[in-house]
Image (spheres, rainbow, N blue to C red):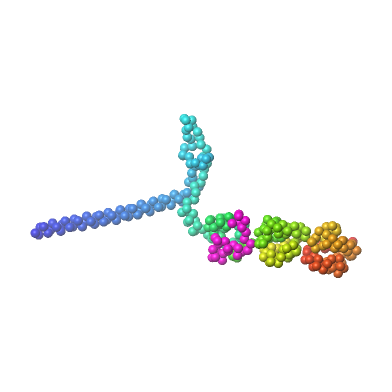
Amino acid sequence: MEEGKGASSKDKGGIGASFTRGAIALVFIIIGYQLALFVHKAAVLRVEANRDRPDTVYVYMSNGGEDVPASPETTNGGVKMKKEVVRKNAPHSPAVKQVRERTRTVESFPFNPNTVSVDDLQRLGFSEKQAQAIDNYRKKGGHFNRREDFAKSFVVADSVYSRLEKYINIPKLDLNKADSVSLLALPGIGPYFAGKIVSYRASLRGYSTTSQLLDIYRFDEEKYNGLKDLVNCSRPEPYPIWTLPEEELAKHPYISKREAHGIVLFRTHQPSSKCTVEELKKSGVISEEHAGSLSKCVLASPEPDS
C-alpha cells in the first residue's frame, strides 16, 4: 500500500511539472503574438509615413491613368512597345494627416475672411475641410460684410470666433472706386441700385460723402442705414465749378440749367474772393437747397484775379 501511495505522489508531481511547463509555453506564445502585432503595426506606420515623402515613394501612371508594370517596355504581337510613364506622388496617408492635424501650430493674425487663402485659414486653426467650406461659400458669391457674419458660418465655432474676432479686418468699400459688381455685396443692393450708384458718381464727379447716396432716386434712409458702416469715400478730384463751361455745369445733380447760366455770369463779373457757394446763394444764383448740397462737395478754389 505504501509503495502504491509513493507511485501516486510521483505521478502527481510529473503532472504538475507538465502543467507548469505548458503554462510557461502559453505565456511565451501570448508574448510572441503581442510582439508580432506590435512589429506589424510599427511596420505599417513606417510605410504610411514614407508615403508622405514623394522623393522616396511614388507610383507610375500611364497616359491613360492606368497603373503600368515596373518594366517600361511591353510586347504586342512580338513588337516591343514603350509606354510613356508619368511620375505621380503617392497620396498622403490618413494616419499621418490626422497626426499633422493634431500637432500643427495654431496662429492668430489679421485677415480678411473674404480674401484669406485656404492655407492661411488652416494656419488660423481651421481644418482643411472647414477651410475649403469657407472658400466654397465665397466662390458661390458669399460675402462677409461684418465680423459677426463670419461668426454665423457653420464651420466657425464660438471659441474660434472669440479668439479671432479682433483679428478680422474687412475693409470698407470705397464708393469712388468700387464697380457695380463689388457694390452687389452690400446689403440691400441689387443690380438696379448698383448701376445707379455708379452713374450718380459719374454725374457728381466723385462722392464727397457717403450721405450723397440718399440723393439717388428711391434710395431711402432704411437702405442707407443698412450699409453706411460698410462704405466710405476716398477724396475725389475737386469739382471745378468756377471754370467749367455752362453745359458741363448743368450736368451736375445740384445745378440746374438756369443756375449754370447764373454761375457763369456771376464768376465773370465778380472777383475771385466772392466766388463761394454762400455768395451764390445770397445773390439768388442758386437755391438754398442746392447750396446746401453743393456745400458738402469738394470744390476747386477759384482762380486768382489777374
Which residue sits at x=89%, y=62%? 265
Q: Which residue occupies the extreme top position in the image?
A: 78
Q: Which residue occupies the extreme left position in the image?
A: 1
Which residue sits at x=87%, y=68%? 283
Which residue sits at x=66%, y=62%? 187
The answer to whether 16 appears left or right of 92 in the picture is left
Q: Which residues are magenta?
A: 137-164
Is 87 one of the magenta-colored residues? no
Residue 259 in picture, x, y percent from top left:
85, 63
Quarter of the picture containing the C terminus is: bottom right
Please tell me whether residue 16 is drawn above or below residue 55 in the rendered image: below
Let me know if residue 267 appears in the view: no
Q: Which residue occupies the extreme front position in the image?
A: 218
Residue 70 in picture, x, y percent from top left:
46, 39
Pick the front one: 46 or 279? 279
Pick the front one: 190 or 268? 190
Residue 275 in picture, x, y percent from top left:
85, 65
Quarter of the picture containing the N terminus is: bottom left
